[in-house]
Amino acid sequence: MTRRTLTIAICTSAVWLPLLVVAARGQQPQGDPKATEVWEPVPKIVTPGKTASDAPSDAIVLFDGKNLDQWVSVKDGSSPAQWTVDSKDGFFTVKKGTGNIQTKRSFTDYQLHIEWRIPTDITGKDQARGNSGVFLASVGTGDAGYELQVLDCYDNKTYVNGQTASIYKQSIPLANACRKPGEWQTYDVIWTAPRFNDDGSLKSPARVTVFHNGVLVQNNYELKGVTQYIGQPTYKKHGPAPIKLQDHGDPSPAISFRNIWVREL
Ligand code: MG
């Protein structure tokens, strides 16, 4: 090899060798990675709770184990709501016959955490076994609203669009993740409220995602309207609304709730 050929060989490999190495690694040899970096807006800092069940720093605590000051009785608007609080152990129990209770505050889109427990001495079957419910937006008295069903379905057969974690009479849950009566259970909910046009027509339907004891049971489900016990669900224009808990009329022993918090989105 002459000196000239050697020089050309060295120069050529100096150019191609790094490119070959880069190509061999499957990387893009050209372009500016900074061109696709986004630096603003910077997400706000939220200090998480000790566990995923504990309220993060920006949550509105709706029940902290002490009282029902954040809740009113739907029947007469009295506050605190009339259900029975056990402040020693930090939970409250449905007081059958007093009716539903709902939050003083109204909400639009939110993330909700709520825990509930079916008593160990539960009786009854089908829909008459630990029936309650979380109305994700209360749009009137009684059971008016969009109901996420609460029921004991650990060993209890009922219609599947009315079982635990169903959007009552609309959406069957993706799984039955019930724990045994006596054990605390969790719902973690992402609620996107429906939007309406000025003339009252529907602009965009409500959507909901629900985890039951950490298991995905409703996956961005698009609601057909407010819950109807009889007939088809329909929409009627409304704005921000309270979250409501159900005092169901069945005679089975009352269920309990604790650790309720919400993050507005
Ligand atoms: Mg119910």
Image (spheres, rainbow, N blue to C red):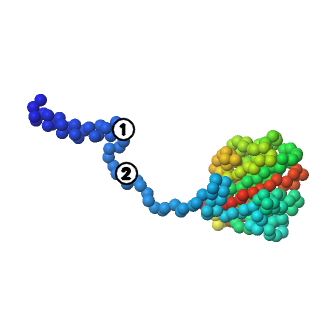
**Residue plotted at (84% across, 47% down):** 120
The residue pinned by badge 2 equals: 33
Instruction: Specify the label residue 25 is tagged with.
Output: 1
Q: Tag on residue 187?
A: none
In which image quadrant can residue 83 be found?
bottom right
How many marks on residues? 2
- At horizontal 74% and vertical 49% (from top left) the residue drawn is 185
**Residue 212 location, x and y as percent?**
70, 48
For the residue with label 1, is its CB less than 8 Å from the closest atom of ligand 1? no
Is 106 situated above or below 149?
below
Q: Tell me where residue 53 appears, x and y as whole percent.
A: 67, 54
> Callout 1: 10 Å neighbours few (<14), some, many (20+)?
few
Among the 4 quarters of the image, the one containing residue 4 = top left
* Residue 139 visible to the viewer: no
> What secondary structure is found at the residue carrying circle 1?
loop
Distance from disc 2 to disc 1, alpha carbons, whole Å, reads 16 Å
Asked which secondary structure carries label 2, the reply is helix
User: Which residue is rendered at x = 17% and y = 35% of the image?
Assistant: 9
Coordinates of residue 256 in the picture (x, y in percent): 80, 55
View extreme (right): residue: 251
Viewport quadrant of the C terminus? bottom right
Q: Is residue 264 left or right of residue 68?
A: left
